[in-house]
Amino acid sequence: MGKVKFIILSILIISSILTRSAERELYFTDFEDAPVGDNELVGYDSWNGTSNNSGSHGIEGAAVEGLGKSAFIGYNSPGRSTDTVYVLRSINHNATTTGEPFVRLEAVVGINDSENPSSNPNRDSFFFTFFNASGSALASLTYNNTENSFGLWREDGRDTYDTGEEFIRNEVQILVIEIDLINNTWSVDLDGFQIFRDERFTVRNISRDLGGVAIQWQRTSGSNWGTNWLLFDDLAVYASTTKLVIPENPFRIKSITRNTSGSRVLSWKVQPGFSYQIQYSNDLRQWLSDLPGSQVSENEEKMITFTDNTSPPNSKRYYRVIRTQ
């Protein structure tokens, strides 16, 4: 398919994010015994979907080094006659009859950006949608990859809300979604960072049980399909009697400001035992680590700042900080 491979960043911390509670596995797949290729996901392990002969979903052999096989949706256009492509897996759970009110989805997820060489490539949206045993949609988490609405959005079956949080293009991250089917709330964390907590799950007056999960690719209205695509792997769904505790990761860029000279100043909290690498990008595609003094470590926990004196005035520049141990 010629897709660009993902950068590994967050996959290294998957084992440290979750504090387990009593749980029962409803479904798990790492796709390792699936055949590799376009159109190979539907029909594997009871996965279903649409646009099944267009190459719009399938199995990748080595999109992320060390991850093995993974599933994808996107990249290859299904044609202008359709606006949405989906793959889905039926996973049944009734919280009332089992006494397990919590359902949790965990997965490695990444959005690879469109390859269009123009300055304004076509970009789309991707959804994780939960539906009930009757096949009716309950709620969705949206990875909106468009420039105008970029970020993570939630939808409760009627209204759509901007969470104010973003994902990182071209990198895999650990997604955790927990749903309280009895109290009709849900929470989402990405790489241990809280995206939202205990928001209303669905407004629809329909049965609140689990029938399965759909992953959708939706074309932006009025545009051609982008060559962006969503990777997902190590997908697990659990039922639980108790709420999962996800400790809030204390590492995050706190602010990016300008000093009196016009240079950008980043601030965040460092902890002993970790090394921090400041990276920057002018286009959200190529990330560089060549800023002077951009490798940081300290012997005590404290707030620090880093000043980028190389950025031209009035230019657009993006930053991230990579923490390693």
Image (spheres, helix red, strand yellow):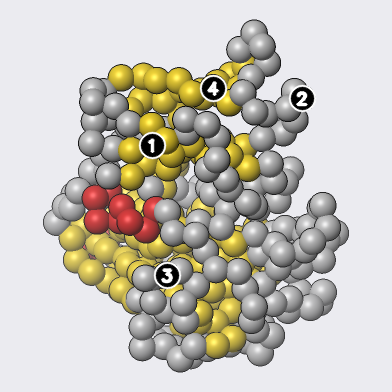
User: Image quadrant for the C terminus?
Assistant: top left
Label total for image: 4
The residue shown at (33%, 38%) is 275
Q: Position of residue 125 (x, y in %)?
A: 65, 58
Mark 4: secondary structure: strand
Q: Residue furthest left?
A: 22
Residue 193 in view (yes/no): no
Mark 2: amino acid: Asn
The residue shown at (82%, 74%) is 80
Q: In the image, which disc is placed on residue 65?
A: 3
Residue 126 in view (yes/no): yes
Is 51 situated left or right of 184 in this image?
A: right
Mark 3: amino acid: Glu
Q: Which picture quadrant has residue 105?
A: bottom left
Q: In the image, which disc is placed on residue 314?
A: 2
* Cα–Cα gap, marks 3 and 1: 22 Å
